[in-house]
Amino acid sequence: MTQKTVRVGGGLEARNAALFVQAAGKFQSSVKLQVDNKTISAKSIMGVISLEIPEGSSLTIIADGKDEEQAAAALGRILEG
C-alpha cells in the first residue's frame, strides 16, 4: 500500500473531478481518497464530487495494487495542479 498526502491546487469541481476519475480509472490498483474521516474510491465520480474539496485542501491518496506507486505519484501531480 502506498499513501501520498497532497495539497489540492485547483479544487475538484465537476470538470476537474471527472478528469481525475478518468485518470484514476487507468490504473489497476485500488485507489482511494481520504479527507478527514471520509474515505472514497478515487474511481467514483459521485464519491469524488461528494468530498467537495476546495482549492488548498489537503487529502491523502491511498493506492494498493500492482501499479500503486505510479498511481499515487500521477494522481498526486494531477491534484497539485
Image (cartoon, grey):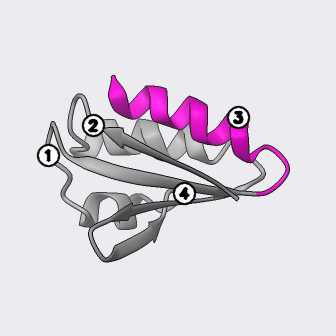
| Within-10-Å neighbours for mark 4: few <14, some 14–19, many 20+ | many
Is there CB contact under 8 Å for labels 2 and 4?
no
| Within-10-Å neighbours for mark 2: few <14, some 14–19, many 20+ | many
Is residue 12 rendered to the left or right of residue 70? left
Q: Position of residue 75 (x, y in %)?
A: 52, 36
The residue indicated by pointer 2 is 8
Mark number displayed over residue 21? none
As measured in the structure, the alpha-carbon distance from the residue carrying label 2 to the one carrying label 4 is 17 Å
Where disc 1 sits, the SS reads: loop
Specify which label sits upstream in the sequence, 2 or 3. 2
Q: Position of residue 28 (x, y in %)?
A: 78, 51
Mark number displayed over residue 70? 3
Specify which label sits upstream in the sequence, 4 or 1. 4
Where disc 4 sits, the SS reads: loop
Is 78 drawn above or below residue 31 in the view shown? above
For this orientation, the residue located farthest to the right is 66
Is there CB contact under 8 Å for labels 2 and 1?
yes
The residue indicated by pointer 1 is 54
Specify which label sits upstream in the sequence, 3 or 1. 1
The residue indicated by pointer 4 is 43
Residue range of the region highlighted in magenta in the rendering: 65-81
| Within-10-Å neighbours for mark 1: few <14, some 14–19, many 20+ | few
Is residue 44 rendered to the left or right of residue 59? right
Where disc 2 sits, the SS reads: loop
Type of the residue with mark 4: Lys
As measured in the structure, the alpha-carbon distance from the residue carrying label 2 to the one carrying label 3 is 18 Å
Q: Residue at x 26, y 43 (%)?
A: 12
Type of the residue with mark 2: Val
Is there CB contact under 8 Å for labels 3 and 1?
no
Most foreground residue, 31 or 69: 69
Quadrant position of residue 63: bottom right
